[in-house]
Image (tube, grey):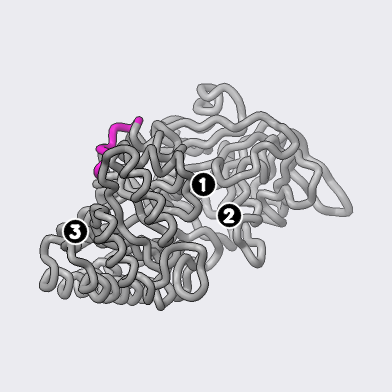
Amino acid sequence: MRVVTAVAELPRHAQPSQFPTLDDVLLLGGIELTRLAERVGRTPFYAYERSHIVSRVAQLRRTLPEGVRLHYALKANPMPALVQLMAGLVDGFDIASGGEMKVALDAGMAPGRVSFAGPGKRDEELRCAVAAGVLLHLESEREMERAACIGAELGMTPRVAVRVNPDFELKMAGMKMGGGPRPFGVDAERVPAMLQRMERLGLDFHGFHIFCGSQNLSAAAICEAQRLSVELGLRLARHARAPLRMLNIGGGFGVPYFPGERALDLAAVAEGLEQSLRPLRQASPDTDLILELGRYLVAEGGIYVCRVLERKRSHGQTFLVTDGGLHQHLAASGNFGQVIRKNYPVAIGNRMHAAAGETVSVVGPLCTPLDLLAERMELPRAEAGDLVVVFQSGAYGLTASPTAFLSHPLPLEVLV
């Protein structure tokens, strides 16, 4: 019996090394995958490892400049047990819906440390947030007026910040969320007038939310966006009568998914952030600088597991037909923002040290050619009953997938 601290090599792909193996079987939370599958009761399922998430937050605490506040963005993974774990690790939560607000508050996070962003907030969501004391990140002038009316109706003063659509973009971002025409936030040049109106409405102004983009592996690009965000926040703060209590500069920290990608240089990001912090500390020393991270905290700590139902040959190509697919893991199928489809790191979880003996495509049970978890990938020979593992699956997995498609059962989720 041998314990190995890194998974077997996945040819032409990044080698996930966050989980050890025991003999030929992947370990998650110290549990053999085959045993975990029995414990869960059925496949497919998602599994998230507590220790990996705890270690990732601890690494950030050690590396980032002192005093930086760390928030978890629930949209990355709102599983209640995972959110409850996060409540004891981070300084606050960022939410994007009334449903996420319920999960956040049920997890025990103080309402004053929860912020609510996103366009198109419904009146009932605004009412709940105001009543709870959640910080509203206003996405438009009209949303500001609606929040003020709701506050008057409830006899409460809404706590608000302005989400700013900046006049710059996060370069090399996997998904751009700011700069140019966007449905998110208020264009930077319109913010001063909005702040004047906010004062007349008597809203409790806290600061700004400047979120440029996500899934970025370039430390230089992230540092530039952080510097520009701090400069913009300080420039806009001059138009506010109230002090700048918080500045949320988003996150954008990426994780490697595809061949050739390298992990983000966190030390370089921290060094750049320290430089960006200096003018903020000088001009507004009581301002809390917030990093809002989701994917970076949880993606690499999760896996998706499905079971091979049968091997199938067609015109010389081998297919592994599984009970999982795009309806449960849209991102791994390549249909969640990829322009050119690339394989996530995939392994046969109970054959981790077997040689990659064949080129196969891993497909699901859906009646569509898009139902593809791995395309022409070199893997050990797998048979019916073997377990397929998709790594980097802790973020934007289940809740980002069309689970109602073809009415298959929902996968389970476990935190181990």
Amino acid, disc 1: Ser
Viewed as shown, does residue 346 lie left or right of 235? right
The answer, for residue 6, to whether it is visible in the render is no
Residue 144 placement: quadrant: bottom left
Location of the N terminus by quadrant is top left
The disc, 3 or 2, on the residue closer to the chain's N-terminal end is 3
- Which dot marks residue 344? 2
Foreground mark, 1 or 2? Answer: 1
In depth, the one of 111 and 40 nearer the eye is 111
Across and down, in percent, residue 72 comes to: 34, 48
In depth, the one of 55 and 75 nearer the eye is 75
Q: Secondary structure at mark 3?
A: loop
- Which dot marks residue 245? 3
The residue beneath circle 1 is: 393
Location of the C terminus by quadrant is top left
Q: CA distance from mark 1 to mark 3?
A: 35 Å
Foreground mark, 3 or 2? Answer: 3
Q: CA distance from mark 1 to mark 2?
A: 9 Å
Which residue is painted at 27% across and 49% down in the image?
159
Viewed as shown, does residue 317 lie left or right of 334? right
Amino acid, disc 3: Arg
Say if the magenta span includes residue 110. Answer: yes
Write the start and end of the magenta stretch as one range.
Answer: 106-112
- The answer to whether residue 197 is above or below residue 23 is below
Q: CA distance from mark 3 to mark 2?
A: 41 Å
Say if the magenta span includes residue 282. Answer: no
The disc, 1 or 2, on the residue closer to the chain's N-terminal end is 2
Foreground mark, 1 or 3? Answer: 3
- The answer to whether residue 104 is above or below residue 360 is above
In depth, the one of 262 and 192 nearer the eye is 192
- The answer to whether residue 265 is above or below residue 412 is below
Q: Secondary structure at mark 1?
A: loop
